[in-house]
Amino acid sequence: MYKVLIIEDDHKLRSLIGQYLAKWNFQPVLVEDFELIDQIALKENPHIILLDINLPGNDGFYWCSKIRQLSDVPVIFISSRSQSMDIVIAMNMGGDDYIQKPFSLEVLVAKMNAVLRRSSSIVDNDFLEVGELILNLQNAYVESRGKKAALTKNEFQILYLLMKKAGQIVSRDEIMRALWEDEQFIDDNTLTVNVNRLRKKLGEIGVEDTITTKKRQGYLLQ
């Protein structure tokens, strides 16, 4: 049974989500104290977090960044905000997906299951190497010449796919299917944000310009 931390200040919606998820073999934990969310997440150690953006005091963006300092647990933002920039910020803060209110509870469960599947995917080997780039498949970090960078679930999946197909153009649709299984639920900005974050981390370990954008085609790892 997967434990899910529900961080939503609307009591009625929070209870509704919790009751529905309990029917789908989830163990809901309803957060009512919005002052120590990162510590609650650390204590509860959930498999996945549902995080509203508009919260009393600090917003969901702030709390996601705090949680990311402690854990790589998957985070799905839930919000009534519909601007593309909100989605971009959510991904930059370390979110794994974004769902806009009002939403179907069936779609929410589908998104949660997709995120959980890719976060718990089992790999056969410990490392994947392309040139001087080494991807640790068990601990989700990338290394080059002794320098390491930790990756989020999305960044890891993108780099894994590009390294498996190094030298080949991988289409945006293929990457989105690998990440979210059904790209119709995904804003196109989400993929761009994740790729840019990945590029930045590769740059921090001295690997510059290894991911090339092929206009109207996809991405290429050189």
Image (cartoon, rainbow, N blue to C red):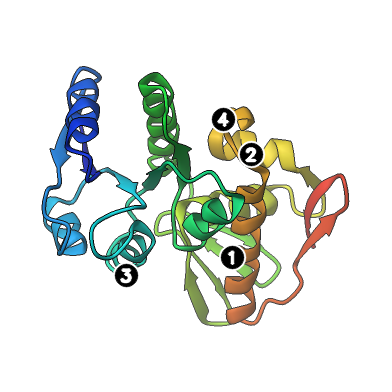
Q: Residues under labels 3 and 4: Cα distance?
A: 28 Å
Q: Which mark is residue 100?
A: none
Q: Is residue 45 above or below residue 6?
A: below
For label 1, the SS is helix
Please state which amino acid type lies under the numbered disc 3.
Answer: Gln
Inspect the image, locate mark 1, and give the three-letter code of the amino acid beneath it: Arg
Q: Is residue 28 above or below residue 139?
A: above
x and y percentages locating residue 91 in the rendered image: 51, 56
Residue at 36%, 48% (x, y): give it: 74
Identify the residue position indicated by label 4 in the image.
Answer: 181
Which of the two discs, 3 and 4, labels the residue nearer the N terminus? 3
| Front residue of 169 and 67 | 67
- At a point 36% along the width and 22% down the height, the residue shown is 105
Q: For the point 64% across and 82% down, which residue is it?
A: 206
Task: State the separation of the CA atoms marked 4 and 1.
Answer: 21 Å
156 displayed left or right of 113: right
Q: Amino acid at mark 2?
A: Met
Return the x and y of residue 31 as percentages of the image width and height: 15, 47
As measured in the structure, the alpha-carbon distance from the residue carrying label 2 to the one carrying label 1 is 16 Å
